[in-house]
């Protein structure tokens, strides 16, 4: 059988198809070539840079923060190893599941973590200053998109010890209060910088360009504080504040020849490891920020002015009534009495308000004012501590009819606790006021110690006036209102104070401030201790609740500092005539 013939393709149709295919192929090739030119030639550098930027990581290498130590090198604030846990949100596969896994390890709510992990940011902090052990637990989970950078956590071994001096740092390690803020520049050092490229999993790509600038460690700060005296001051003050049911109290222990502060206690205080859990009012340093009317402890300065003027001696005779009238007000002594025949020494020992005013009249308003200013009242102490208040002392041109007598015996002016201690340190240092200081010096990362510049001192009264006044202050402790401040074997000079307390929240006087400020040994003063207890309930006299605190702290401090007992008897100046 014959098969049908196969149709023959038309030549013109075949050529047309070929031309179409060739044109289409050429067009596609041209488009691809054009796109390739655009990608590689025109946009190539920009796209390459974008890809490199996507891989490149720039991060800070935190400098190790310097430690804070006491005068003997005992650590009060240190930095320990920690990590900052961070995340690349684009690499997180399932934020909800990841959050549930991390929550129990980091101690954060899963819902909060889920919000942190969700988004398209390449870098977010999950939690700062995490314990390295916790990070090892996270690593074991093999969670994608979560990383850690070396960091440090600030630790205060003594918890509440010296906390109001030390202050605290924020989550970024920057000082927010106290010495941590005051010495931020020296403590912080200089952060380093790391540049490198990473793969999609966040790992550094080997053999790529990288650059590292190493951090410079911060310097240590050596304080003038003696850890053991500080602990004793806080312990004894806390017991007294609790027993008196007072609002708070302060103690300052100072070396008069240098102005060095060996202890500065504030009760109640905070744990610097957890400052955010404490009441805002407790986070500062009340010894420098809070001011109060000193009351009878200020009579020492009035007596210094009178003695230094040469218009009276310790044995100058006065007849002192119980009260005196000033305009429509009557001022009086704390205990009712008939006319008393007192020496200037007896006026101070018995803490007579009226007698102090009679003595102050010998020098006048301006004479008293100028001496108080030389003592540093209403002036910056030079301590440089954050939040310092300078107190108040009105100019005589503004005084009312009662201002002169009340300022003479310690009301109508205000001081902070450092100023109160500094005034007594001036008399202990033969009339020369040294600038108070808390920082003894710095220790470089290499271990070199640089001492802080010493104070030059300011002459306030003559050395003779200071010696006489110390003898008069001994009479206060031996035979006057300060007998509870006595320390066996040592001559003690000091003054009690019981001042009306101005309450700024009420806008009026309410309650008292009980104080005692003194020096030991009186014959050759090595330490000055000032105690103030604010708003005690019940017993409120300085000689009853503040003087015993002085005695307990002084008893420990003279032993700890190896200060020899007094070798001579007290002067025993006459109180009456």
Image (cartoon, grey):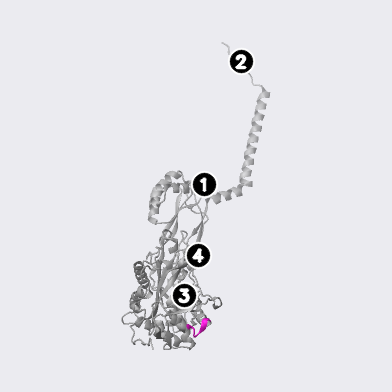
Mark earlier in primary sequence (3, 4): 4
Q: Position of residue 125 (x, y in %)?
A: 47, 53
Mark earlier in primary sequence (4, 1): 1
> Which residue matches tag 1?
120
Image quadrant where residue 523 sits: bottom left
Q: What element carries label 3?
A: loop
> Which residue matches tag 4?
190
* Quadrant holding the N terminus: top right
Dot 1 alpha-carbon crowd within 10 angstroms: few under 14, some 14 to 19, many 20 or more: few
Q: Nearer the viewer, mark 3 or mark 4?
A: 3
The residue positioned farthest toward the right in the image shown: 12
For the residues labelled 4 and 1, the Cα–Cα distance comes to 31 Å
Residue 127: within the magenta?
Answer: no
Q: Residue 53 carries which label?
A: none
The residue positioned farthest toward the top in the image shown: 1
Q: What element carries label 1?
A: loop
For the residues labelled 3 and 1, the Cα–Cα distance comes to 65 Å
Give the mark count: 4
Q: Nearer the viewer, mark 3 or mark 2?
A: 3
Q: Which of marks 2 and 1 is in front?
A: 1
> Which residue matches tag 3?
411
Q: Position of residue 482 (x, y in %)?
A: 36, 78
Asked if the residues shown at circle 3 and circle 1 are in contact, with their CB atoms under 8 angstroms apart, the answer is no
For the residues labelled 4 and 2, the Cα–Cα distance comes to 95 Å
With respect to residue 342, does 233 lie above or below?
A: above
- Front-most of 57 and 573? 573
> Which residue matches tag 2?
5
For the residues labelled 2 and 1, the Cα–Cα distance comes to 70 Å
Q: Is mark 2 on a helix, strand or loop?
A: loop
Q: Where is residue 251 in the image (x, y as percent from the top left)?
A: 40, 72
């Amino acid at each position: 059988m014959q098969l049908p013939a196969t149709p023959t393709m038309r030549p013109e149709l075949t050529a047309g198809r070929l031309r179409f295919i060739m044109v289409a192929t050429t067009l596609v090739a041209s488009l691809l070539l054009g796109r390739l030119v655009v990608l590689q030639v025109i946009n190539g550098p920009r796209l390459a840079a974008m890809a490199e930027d996507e891989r490149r990581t720039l991060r800070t290498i935190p400098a190790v923060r310097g430690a804070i130590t006491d005068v003997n090198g005992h650590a009060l604030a240190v930095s320990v190893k920690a990590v900052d846990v961070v995340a690349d949100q684009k690499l997180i596969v399932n934020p909800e599941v990841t959050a549930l896994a991390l929550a129990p390890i980091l101690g954060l709510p899963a819902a909060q973590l889920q919000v942190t992990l969700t988004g398209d940011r390449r870098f977010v902090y999950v939690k700062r200053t995490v314990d390295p052990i916790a990070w090892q637990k996270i690593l074991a989970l093999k969670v994608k998109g979560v990383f850690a950078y070396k960091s440090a956590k600030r630790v205060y071994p003594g918890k509440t010890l010296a906390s109001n001096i030390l202050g605290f740092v924020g989550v970024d390690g920057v000082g927010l209060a106290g010495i941590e803020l005051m010495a931020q520049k020296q403590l912080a050092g200089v952060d380093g910088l790391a540049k490198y490229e990473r793969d999609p999993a966040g790992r550094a790509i080997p053999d790529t360009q990288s650059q590292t600038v190493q951090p410079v460690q911060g310097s240590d700060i050596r304080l003038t504080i003696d850890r053991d005296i500080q602990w004793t001051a806080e312990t004894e003050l806390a017991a007294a504040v609790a027993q008196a049911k007072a609002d708070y109290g302060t103690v300052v222990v100072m070396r008069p020849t240098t102005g060095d502060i060996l202890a500065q206690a504030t009760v109640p205080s905070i744990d610097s490891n957890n400052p955010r859990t404490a009441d805002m009012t407790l986070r500062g340093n009340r010894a420098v920020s809070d001011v109060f009317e000193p009351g009878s402890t200020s009579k020492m300065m009035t007596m210094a002015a009178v003695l230094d003027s040469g218009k009276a001696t310790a044995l100058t005779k006065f007849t002192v009534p119980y009260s005196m009238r000033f305009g429509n007000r009557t001022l009086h002594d704390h205990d009712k009495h008939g006319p008393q025949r007192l020496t200037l020494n007896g006026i101070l020992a018995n803490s007579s308000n009226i007698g102090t005013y009679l003595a102050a009249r010998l020098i006048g308003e301006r004479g008293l004012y100028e001496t108080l200013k030389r003592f540093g009242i209403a002036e910056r102490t030079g301590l440089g501590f954050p939040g310092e208040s300078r107190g108040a002392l009105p100019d005589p041109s503004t005084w009312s009819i009662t201002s002169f007598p009340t300022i003479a015996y310690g009301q109508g002016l205000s001081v902070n606790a450092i100023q109160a201690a500094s005034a007594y340190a001036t008399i202990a240092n033969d009339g020369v006021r040294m600038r108070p200081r808390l920082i003894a010096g710095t220790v470089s990362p290499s271990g070199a110690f640089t001492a802080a510049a010493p104070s030059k001192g300011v002459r306030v009264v003559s050395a003779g006036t200071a010696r006489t006044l110390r003898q008069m202050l001994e009479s206060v402790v031996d035979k006057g209102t300060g007998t509870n401040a006595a320390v066996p074997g040592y001559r003690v000079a000091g003054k009690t104070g019981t001042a009306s307390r101005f309450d700024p929240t009420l806008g009026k006087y309410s309650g008292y401030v009980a104080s005692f400020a003194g020096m030991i040994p009186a014959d050759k003063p090595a330490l000055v201790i000032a105690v103030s207890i604010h708003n005690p309930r019940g017993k409120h006299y300085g000689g009853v609740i503040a003087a015993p605190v002085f005695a307990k702290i002084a008893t420990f401090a003279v032993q700890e500092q190896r200060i020899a007992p007094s070798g001579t008897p007290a002067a025993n100046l006459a109180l009456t005539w």
